[in-house]
Amino acid sequence: MSEPAFKSDDILIAERLGPTHVAVAQQPTEPRQVPRISIHVFCFSPETGVAMKRAAEDRRVARAHMTVMMGGVESAIEHYCDKPTPNLIVVESKGTREHVVAEMTRLSECCDPGTKVIVLGATNDIQLYRELMRRGISEYLVAPFTPVGIIDTVAMLYGDPSAAPIGRVMAFMGAKGGVGSSTLAHNVAWALSEAFEDEVTIIDFDLHFGTTGLNFNQEQGQGLIDAVTAPDRLDHMLLERLLVKQSERLSLFTAPASLEREMELAPEACEAILDVVRGAVPSIIVDLPHVWTPWVRHILQTADDIVITATPELASLRNAKNMIELLKQTRPNDAPPRLVLNQVGMSKRPEIPLKDFAEAAGLDLSLVLPFDPQLFGTAANNGQMLGELKDNKPAQGIRDLAAAITGRQADAVRRRKKPAFSFLGSGKAR
């Protein structure tokens, strides 16, 4: 067998595929991050160019430098005649098997050792796939191409197969102050740790007014401040010392809740903290304050899942709608945020009907919680979660929301009659 034309670090084995299957870009089951690499893409068709440009704008590619050009393989060969090649080249070819192999042979003469190549083709040809693998091509994908599928393929090429899975970041934010976003975040975290036995860490980024310590009946700590002020020092060992252990599977990064020290967070510091925590636990709940700063926006745009909590009133609707529209625009390859309506049914308060609220916000309601000051007040005063109290419908709804966010037991969500307040409905109950 001849030596591979491309000096790739990981030549894939063609025999892993079935007799008629060629690797196709697909929606990943778990989010993946592309490391700090340089990527050049040479597209042949305008449709592929659009998909690649959308991929380049995706949050998972924020650390990489991705350049999209038109012209296909011929443009790539011409481009690298007198230029060094990047970490990864992605080229689209529309030719026959013999034509594609000939193009890759010519391209290999221009590539530096260590450069990986992904070929985008239109032919579902297993013989072509095997021939490209023998020549050192890293992957061959068949149309149609999706931005997330391409991103996942690139991330897998540069990922460590033996590395632990990356944790999922779920960001919770209120459409305005006092809507119960923190309470919801804490109860979802508790449900994940107890009902689904996940390891969960809550990060309370509301440094001055955070309630994580209060809600879990723990003393306010300085751990998060220490991490924010020196994020480059944070590693797994230091993380263990800074976290407050609430239970076997639930840990807290509590806010100091002190007004003595003014502090503005940097997006880079928040990202560094999240990177370390993501490498330690599978589920991370981020409790965001109701402020609009560069670091809050950065966390929202890079989180895996977002939950917006609102109340059925005009100001809350306006803010929720603005947030939803911005996130849909800046996260085009992600699912939209989840919208939770809280404190519904408050006596003598005029409210926007659920159906009208959902239609105006442009998003179905994932969860509707009733106004129940006795239940929520008792839990808050005792430092307990709703699931620790006697059976109650809000706790069931929150557990269903946790299952929906993480995809855990999604098919087992109870199909019960719609109550006076819908706990996991479409927002059309009223």
Image (cartoon, grey):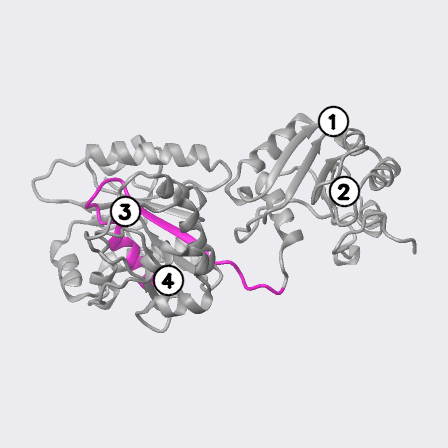
Compute the Cα span from label 1 to label 3.
47 Å
Residue 184 belongs to the span the image colors magenta: yes
Inspect the image, locate mark 2, and give the three-letter code of the amino acid beneath it. Answer: Asn
Q: Which residue is mark 1?
A: 71
Inspect the image, locate mark 4, and give the three-letter code of the amino acid beneath it. Answer: Thr
Instruction: State which quarter of the image contains the C terminus.
Output: top left
Q: Position of residue 85 (x, y in %)?
A: 74, 40
Looking at the image, tell me whether mark 2 or mark 1 is earlier in sequence order: 1
Residue at the (80%, 44%) spot, across then down: 125
- Closer to the observer: label 3 or label 2? 3
Q: Position of residue 391 (x, y in %)?
A: 22, 65
- Please say if 221 is above or below 72: below
Q: Are marks 4 and 2 in contact (CB under 8 Å)?
A: no
Q: Secondary structure at mark 1?
A: loop
Compute the Cα span from label 3 to label 2.
50 Å
Inspect the image, locate mark 3, and give the three-letter code of the amino acid beneath it. Answer: Pro
Compute the Cα span from label 4 to label 1.
47 Å
Residue at the (63%, 34%) spot, across then down: 67
Q: Nearer the viewer, residue 236 or 189?
A: 236
Q: Secondary structure at mark 2?
A: loop
Compute the Cα span from label 4 to label 2.
44 Å
Q: Secondary structure at mark 4?
A: strand
